[in-house]
Image (cartoon, rainbow, N blue to C red):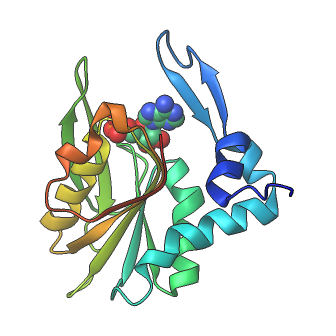
Amino acid sequence: MTHHPTLRETLDTIIRRIPDFPKPGIVFRDITPLLADPARFTQAIMAMLGPWRGAGITHVVGIESRGFIFGAPIALGLEVAFVPVRKPGKLPHRVEREEYALEYGTDALEMHADALGDGARVLVVDDVLATGGTARATARLIERLGGEVAGFAFLMELTALGGRELLPGRRVESLLPT
Ligand code: AMP
């Protein structure tokens, strides 16, 4: 009998691993072959948003920049607002900013201060959960703006890096835990 690969097996094959990018020791997960395959890309989006149907989501927050690519179609699929979280200096209106520690130094993320209305229940979307620092900073930003974080949807989760431990008590769904 022929083996019909599961969506996870297919995605695992289609997402390229690029060793030592952008620096030695990092195995970069390159999603561009997935984006070039509309049938698979659609399946990935549907599988990412599936667990959140009926969860009362009002906003999808996508994290710059690959979180935009997955977050925007997920927002459309759930028929809710899409909100970008960006690197400093990119958003034109009044912003709220959250700084967070990196291995060396700090980084920051910004969101428009008026992006979430009263009663916002937010799904955070990104392509990869690695150490979890970016996701945690995004959750803090949303909560400072009065939103409730319903949970996180990732395409991939690098489980060895323990990102979930920075998100205790949060609902975290990842399509491809590796
Ligand atoms: P972190 O804050 O460590 O969880 O890093 C998450 C951010 O870095 C996400 O926006 C990812 O897109 C990106 N990222 C981290 N590690 C990788 C990797 N191995 N391949 C591709 N993107 C990564």
Horizontal side of 134 relative to 11 (left or right) equals left
Q: Position of residue 101 (x, y in %)?
A: 19, 30
Residue at 35% of width from left, 63% of height from top?
93
Specify whether 171 is left or right of 127: left
Q: Is residue 147 left or right of residue 8?
A: left
Looking at this view, name the residue that lies furthest to the front.
1
Image position, residue 77 (x, y; %): 58, 81
- Is 102 or 13 nearer to us in this picture? 13
Residue at figure coordinates x 45%, y 80% from the top left:
81
Give the x, y percent position of residue 143.
15, 66
In the image shown, does 169 or 112 lie closer to the viewer?
Answer: 169
Q: Please tell me which residue is depicted at 63% across the width and 63% down the height of the picture.
A: 44
Residue 31 in the figure: left or right of residue 143:
right
The single residue placed furthest to the top in the displayed view is 24
State the count of labels. 0
Q: Which quadrant of the rendered structure holds the N terminus?
A: bottom right
Task: Residue 174: tell me if it is visible.
Answer: yes
Relative vertical location of residue 98 with respect to residue 59 in this rendering, above or below:
above
Quadrant of the picture in which ligand 1 is shown: top left
Query: Is residue 68 positioned above or below 160 on the image?
Result: below
Q: Quadrant of residue 31?
A: top right
Q: In front: 22, or 1? A: 1
Q: What residue is shown at x 53% (from left), y 19% (from top)?
A: 22
**Residue 55 image offset from top left, x and y in percent:** 34, 85
Is residue 115 at least partly visible in the picture? no
User: Based on the displayed image, in which of its 4 quarters is residue 46 positioned?
Assistant: bottom right
